[in-house]
Image (spheres, helix red, strand yellow):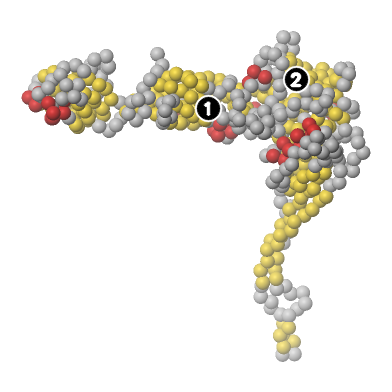
Amino acid sequence: MPSTTIIAQPATLMPAYNPIKYIINNTNKNEPGFRYIFTIYPAAGSHIPANVVAQYKVLPVYGTGYGEQDISLLMQSLVTFNLTNGPVPESWYQYDVDLGYEYIYNVDYFSTLQNNGGNVRIVLTGTPNLFVAGDQVIIAQTGTGPTGNPALEGLHTVISATASTFTVNVLWSTIGESTANGNVAYADQRKIVVLNDSLITNKEVFNGAYSSGIYANNEAFPVSSYDGVGGTQIGLSSLTNNSQSSAALTSGLYSEYFLLMCRVYSGVPYNITFYDMGGNILAGPFTINITSDGLYNFNLAPSQYGITEDYHVEIEGDSGGIPFWSYWFKYDDRCAINQDTLVYLDRMGSWQTFTFQLKTYEKGQITREQYNQHINGFVASSQWQSGNSETGFRTYNTNVAYSLDLNTNWMDQYNADRFQELLTSPQVYYGKEDGFPLYACTVESTGFENFRQRNKNLIKQSVTIKLAKQVPING
């Protein structure tokens, strides 16, 4: 029977950027040199040393004695993003956890000492003997043992052993108290190591970070709403536009990116259908057959289906399958100066787009590195002169960094909330009016104000971005 008890563990499916904490207990935690051992393996693989992803040895927590380990940093290194429509295995990882322990091997003896050919024999009761001839051991006696048997105290050598006894090189004639008890350990502090005392299998993480708001305090991840099993499900996205009153803005004039990442299952056909605000079908249903478990990016953008009005999307499994929430979008046909876009990775791993319809300003910052070189010149009429075209200050490295100031149109409170998520996104791409190609960029903002409609009826925002690639300049 395992000596490990699981006190707490994360949900089956977890965001990699939230705490992923395991808490366990073990009956051996008071043994000397005790450590809890957490060993991470890929799911559905052999639990052999060659397959170990990571291993943690943890001291018991003061007060409870529990072993606690957060593996979120490890999981973050195993998932990433992918801006594609379709399967996204890069954003998903499955793993197993072996729960084990180690401690310095030591045994207590309570039986009366015996004479074995003139040497002291120690009998172990209820514990199999692991010592063999030649082992160096340390004996620590209790009670009257140290004074009654001073020769038996300390470092000795095992000269013979059986399954339940071992004999040390101490003369029986030195024993004055044969009923004294004691403890025996290896002199080199050798440990008992158990790596797989208990096992946790088929845990999953995805490239996301869950929070219910700015005041969130590490609340539990509501996995039953996201794992795609039973009941109404939510895509792995921070989009909450599940009603007509909270709809995300979409232009429809270009190929927008609204890629909703969902947990899907092999063998389940998923149907995606586009409706107008009255519930009439605009396009679909389109069936997507999933061939393997994992994550899938569903494209919710209207342009590929020729939709030019307000709409909402529904994704559902086949009969008896998994229904997902509806997602609502407003077709933004206001007069626009520009149709620049920023595609960004949202907190939960899906991709959203923000449109900037007002004036765009393109700027460049130039840096130069120079040195002052020797001027050869020439001699004319016995006087040295420098040529007009000769260079003293030589520029040897010129760099230019392009930046863009983008301005949104007026927007409602929901889209103002989306904008602050754009500012904090680690992955952002810039697209011109046709949406292609996309250019990697970084958001320059270091702070923001999330306007509230009660304080400011008309909300618009601006952002400065810097293109992520350096423009080559010849020398």
Q: Amino acid at mark 1?
A: Lys
Q: Residues within 10 Å of mark 2 (few under 14, many from 20)?
A: some
Is disc 1 in contact with disc 2, using a CB cutoff of under 8 Å? no
| Left or right of 401 in this view: 15 | left
Furthest-front residue in view? 455
Identity of the residue drawn at 88% across and 33% down: 332
Identity of the residue drawn at 72% across and 9% down: 320
Quarter assignment of residue 354: top right
Furthest-bottom residue in view? 382
Placement of 390 over or under 340, stated as above or below: below
Q: Amino acid at mark 2?
A: Trp
Residue 82's spot in the image, x, y percent?
Answer: 69, 33
Disc 1 designates what residue?
21
Determine the secondary structure under disc 2. Answer: strand
Residue 254's spot in the image, x, y percent?
Answer: 85, 35
Furthest-right residue in view? 335
C-alpha span from label 1 to label 2 = 29 Å
Disc 2 designates what residue?
325
Tell me the number on the disc at residue 341. Answer: none
Count how many numbered circles sit on residues in the image: 2
Q: Earlier in the sequence, mark 1 or mark 2?
A: 1
Does residue 273 show up?
yes
Identity of the residue drawn at 66% across and 72% down: 373
| Left or right of 30 in this view: 167 | left
Quarter holding the N terminus?
top left
Determine the secondary structure under disc 1. Answer: strand
Does residue 160 show up?
no
| Left or right of 120 in this view: 11 | right
Q: Residues within 10 Å of mark 1 (few under 14, many from 20)?
A: some
Placement of 441 over or under 57, stated as above or below: below
Closest to the observer, 407 or 171: 407
Residue 244's spot in the image, x, y percent?
Answer: 83, 24
